[in-house]
Amino acid sequence: MSHSTKSLPEHGHLTACHECDLLVNLPHERVGYRLKCPCCGYVIVDTRYDALGKTLAASLAALLLFIPANLLPIMAINIGDMGQSTTVLQGAQLMWQAEYFWVAFMVVLTAFIVPLLELSLLLSITVLAKLRRGMGFVVSAVKVYQKIRSWGMLEVYMFGILVSIVKLVDLADLVVNGGLYCFGGLLFCSTYAAASFDPHEVWEIVDETKH
Amino acid sequence: MKPNTDPETPAASGRAIHRGLVLCHDCHKLNRWDIKQAHAIQRCGRCGAKMHPRKPNSLARTWALSITAALCLIPANILPIMTIISFGKGQSDTIMSGVIALIHYEMYPIALVVFIASVAVPVMKLLGIWILCLSVQFGWNSSPRQRTVLYRMVEFIGKWSMLDVFVIAILVALVNLGALATIEAGHGATAFCLAVVITIFAAESFDSRLIWDQEENRNE
């Protein structure tokens, strides 16, 4: 193991709570264990059976759904004989053309780029961790993932779609397209991938392979 | 399952900082912190990230960002966020007038959702951040556990204020029917989006461990 672990033999099974800095013992049995901080209640460790496999499957499914969810129109509107349909990117593109650059940028970032990046990172992390290869990349991928994850806002966007439907339903004929169902599936799979991902398991594999 | 299952080394053995240990922010590994080189850059033994016992200048940064966000909320609420142009006639909506219009059309549940997401959440979030900052700065004697819950809520609700921004982006793209009906965005949307983003940064820069540090100093 790395030199810092050697210099800290007595702290091998200790960790500190992320939110209140309390020192806590890590359990030896690691599957199906949920450790809450006795001081502030923060969930420090939550390991499930084959968390890596679950994250891998869910992020792969979400990535596949990402394609139709963003290519197919989410919904369409008809007033008289005129019609218009939209996707996430078209919405942002029109904002950009209207010179609302900042709003357009944030929509693309939070509803397209960050979710796509998150899912690709999760998939590559879990695949490489399973294969026990490319640990240098895994280390930076987990770090990037943890930094960007608060900027993925697919679920808020989904709510935005629902609010728009309610706002428009009296004014015009609304057609819900296949894109919306793909978007719903994408939301489900990506939430499941993020919830089942356990960075502690990955860091343990990183330590093992360095050894 | 109860924590602290190993009786030989009790779990509640103090805070990491008192034993010269620092949790790496990136990979959650406990590292030894060399107090003699407190001003030098110390890196995590596992992932190589720069370590800080506490987030640097946490209070000052949180104050600065949250006050900026509060200032952004002023134009966000005064300027129109979108304009509906129908048969050549335009009608501008601010955040509040949009909510009032929804109430007017008797769409109460959706009015409540929009009100919570675009008015209540941004205001409550800033108030929550300020309560946390004030309590740490002036050593208020309230329960640290309650304040930790407040911190978690502030972190959780942050992104939901983006709802209105997304709704505008969707409506602008959908209702683009030339002379018949068009929806255009307004500059209030830019200010509002900016306020949401800065508030998220403000919540991120606050270090929840400060709440507990202060509790410990009082007990000593």
Image: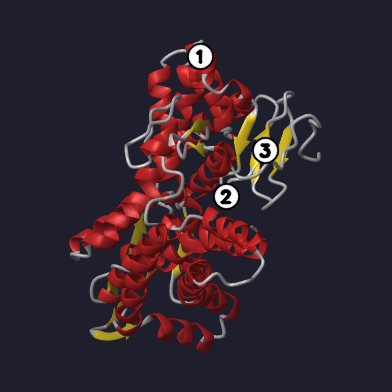
Q: Residue at x 33, y 67 (%)?
A: B64
Instruction: Give the SS element for disc 1.
Output: loop
Q: Is residue B27 above or below residue B116?
A: above
Q: Residue at x 28, y 69 (%)?
A: B190
Q: Position of residue B139 (x, y in %)?
A: 55, 69
Look at label 3 and name its amino acid.
Val
The answer as to whether the residues below labels 1 and 3 share one chain is yes
Q: Disc 1, disc 2: CB below 8 Å?
A: no
Q: Residue at x 23, y 76 (%)?
A: B179
Q: Position of residue B169 (x, y in %)?
A: 34, 63
Look at label 2 and name its amino acid.
Glu
Residue on which the image places disc 2 = A19
Tell which circle, 1 or 2, labels the residue nearer the N-terminal end. 1
Q: Position of residue B149 (x, y in %)?
A: 63, 61
**In the image shown, does B59 or B34 lie closer to the viewer?**
B34
Q: Residue at x 79, y 29 (%)?
A: B8
Residue on which the image places disc 3 = A24
Please, which chain is the residue tagged with disc 1 on?
A
Residue on which the image places disc 1 = A1
Q: Disc 2, disc 3: CB below 8 Å?
A: no
Q: Position of residue B203 (x, y in %)?
A: 45, 60
